[in-house]
Image: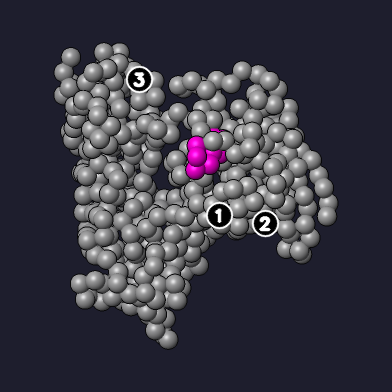
Amino acid sequence: MQDTTYDVVVIGAGPVGENIADRVVQGGLTAAIVERELVGGECSYWACMPTKALLRSATALRAARQMPGAREAVTGALDAAAVLRRRDAFASNWTDDGQVSWLDSAGIALYRGQGRISADRVVEVTGEDGATTSLTARHAVVVATGSSALIPDVTGLREAAPWTSREAAAASKVPGRLAVIGGGVVASEMATAFASLGSVVTVLARDGMLPLAEPFAGERVTKSLQEAGVSVRLGAEAASVNRDDDGTVRVMLTDGEQVEADELLVAIGRTPNTQDIGLDRIGLKPGAWLTVDDTLRVVGEDGALVGDGWLYAAGDVNHRVLLTHQGKYQARAVGDVIVARAKGEAVEDGRWGRHVAAADERAVPQVVFTDPEVASVGLTAAAAEATGLRIRVVDYDLAAVAGSALHAEGYQGHARMVVDEDRKVIVGFTLVGPDVAELLHAATIAVVGEVPLDRLWHAVPAFPTVSEVWLRLLEAYGR
């Protein structure tokens, strides 16, 4: 067994693990990263990048058709084969040569195989050939193994070989009929994508569409999907699933109705990739989400740090926020705090300190790339009330903004800001409409910066842009 020592060992070479290792090396320490699949992780090959590539062409076509002068030039339909080829390119054709080259240029050692914690600060890596390498960390081990799609215990479901987000994002052909179990972000985006590519789509949304967003967001996405020919079954729940010998999938609903499809996508949630990383060797439960303190050190069920605080967890695996950009944000904090502790420097762990992921709690930005897009940051009105805040909700019709009518013929959308009335700051912001993703960062800055409403009056939006909605919301609030 080969024995090698580094300052930091990271298990998982997705975007979170890559960023942790990079920050560590930039801080003057050495780092090794362990990966059992492709370097670059879920986002690069089976999530963010290929998913948005599947969606973007249809979005551009819809935009052209909504614009007089441009729509007259559109003479053909969406080319599904071309869309899939573009998707393949953004997924690097499922090869990680470029990512591996970057690790090498950054001075990060790569070990391929299954990484398992075998003792304090020790990770054993088992390669495909069965050979084992023991990696010892002088300062920290970081778990950044991410999550996988959750498959519920529905009779016959696993045997029917359903798609998860991975198979949907990497599909080599467009199914004639697609059934989707779930109504969250993945379900909504994949229903949008495959409907635009030509599939007859049925969505079985037991808890509604986008149930964690503001209600108007789910309502508008549902309406748009239905207008695109998607059958959205709100409240529908699968009781059993069967795949016939000819490949047809039959989903029996709890109300006795049956839905037939060529493929079935299950998108109801995620489960942590912690089943086989050696957690049992250090007193933790395999297959469980990892709990962390403010600086993302792992703690046990008793709330005490694992060992002397040598174990960290970042990204999906700590169950704080399951979003790539938020995981990378955590990664920067983790990498920097490990360096600070290794060098005996001060740890900035106060509110909004550089070594904590404070935004995870109340300032998370997210975009759902459906038609229309849903962009949000911070708390919904319901979530804000649940925390005990005294709030005021201000809504505005995006179609009434001059820039919206110029942006697209028949533009439809909605904006909402949630105001903490005691501090007079925005704690939540949601936009629904074409291309609203590009408006989100202004709202994120307002929430994170806790900019008083009186000061926002001096942030004058350019005319005529959709951003003028900021002025209209302030006017609706009153001064």
Q: Position of residue 63 (x, y in %)?
A: 32, 47
Q: Disc number at residue 144?
A: none
- Secondary structure beneath dot 2 equals strand
Judged by depth in the image, the label closer to the viewer, 1 or 2, is: 1
Q: Could you say which is closer to the camera, residue 237 or residue 209?
A: 237
Q: Which residue is mark 2?
A: 114
Task: Measure how far apart labels 1 and 3 are at the Cα level.
Answer: 39 Å
**Residue 163 is a magenta residue:** no
Q: Position of residue 329 (x, y in %)?
A: 52, 34
Q: Could you say which is closer to the camera, residue 119 or residue 216?
A: 119
Q: Position of residue 229 (x, y in %)?
A: 25, 63
Say few, some or many: other residues with alpha carbon within 10 Å of mark 3 (under 14 / 14 to 19 / 20 or more): some
Q: Which residue is mark 3?
A: 450
Quadrant of the rendered structure where residue 163 is? Answer: bottom left
Could you tell whether 214 is left or right of 447 in the image? left
Q: Upstream in the sequence, badge 1 or badge 2?
A: 2
Q: Main secondary structure of the magenta part?
A: loop
Q: Which residue is mark 1?
A: 286
- Span shown in magenta: 296-303
Query: Farthest front residue?
Result: 302
Q: Upstream in the sequence, badge 3 or badge 2?
A: 2
- Secondary structure beneath dot 3 equals loop
Quarter that holds the C terminus = top left
Q: Is residue 118 above or below residue 297?
A: below
**Amino acid at circle 3:** Glu
Quadrant of the rendered structure where residue 222 is? Answer: bottom left
Say few, some or many: other residues with alpha carbon within 10 Å of mark 2 (under 14 / 14 to 19 / 20 or more): many
